Amino acid sequence: MKGSTHLAIGAAIGAASTLYYPFHPNHGAVYMLVASFSALAADLDGPSLLSGKLGKLSRWLRGFALWSGILLVIANAYWFVFEDWFSFQYSSIAVVVLLLSLVTSQGTIRNALVSIVGLGLMYAGLRSGQAWLMELGGFVAWVPWLKHRGMTHTVWALLIWGTIGWGLEKQIGIPGVTATAVAGYASHLLADMLTPNGVKWLSPLYKKSFKFIPR
């Protein structure tokens, strides 16, 4: 399943959460961000959006997103370390932009960069006392080195992601964040069940692939 398809499904889930839960402009942005990133998070273990045969426009977009994300992360890190100021919204935008650019490439360098972002999130979580952010950082730092469509495409990863979403919901006090995060992540696994390889939901305990298409 293409990354663009996963992203579109995630955006639809975010929009549905915005309509379902009590509306507030800031809440709507959080739902969209959480759902969209959750729908792509499972593919941090391998190539995703824009990978393969990239055209000139795609390469430019990837480079622009990468450097924009790096500059945004540096700016947020400066504010956090030297100004003792932290904004969940701005920091989330910075990290998501950077991660979205990184999931478009592959290889050791790509994996190392993603892991560095994860370690940075863990440090920020430790400094700010936000357990969910440390958990997210651990997830981001670990999964790039896993086999593609391996552990990130299981019910265990979905439970871990739900725990992260629950911690975020408690931190920011916006109802429905947990459900939105779980729905976004689950949508990725369900969509991949439409592909020939399917999804090994219960790996490593049970390594048979589950799929919606006939053999």
Image (cartoon, rainbow, N blue to C red):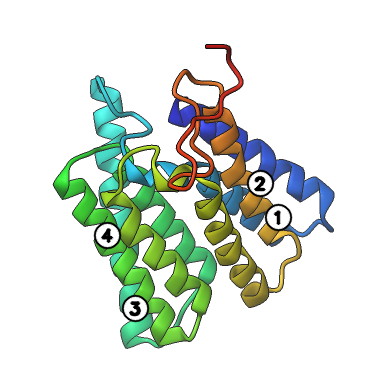
Residue, disc 4: 115
The residue carrying pointer 4 sits among few (fewer than 14), some (14 to 19) or many (20 or more) residues within 10 Å by Cα, namely: many
Dot 4 amino acid type = Ser
Residue, disc 2: 183
Q: Would residue 50 be found to the left or right of residue 208 on screen?
A: left
Q: How far across and down, in percent of the image, does residue 170 sit?
A: 67, 75
- In the depicted view, which residue is nearer to us: 162 or 79? 162
Q: Give the structural element (helix, strand or loop) at label 4.
A: helix
Q: Nearer the viewer, mark 3 or mark 1?
A: 1
The circle drawn on residue 179 is: 1
Q: How many marks?
A: 4
Cβ–Cβ below 8 Å for labels 1 and 2? Answer: yes
* C-alpha distance separating marks 3 and 2: 27 Å
* C-alpha distance separating marks 4 and 2: 25 Å
* C-alpha distance separating marks 1 and 4: 26 Å
Direction front: furthest residue: 205
Direction left: furthest residue: 109
* C-alpha distance separating marks 1 and 2: 6 Å
Cβ–Cβ below 8 Å for labels 4 and 2? Answer: no
Q: How far across and down, in percent of the image, does residue 132 sit?
A: 52, 72
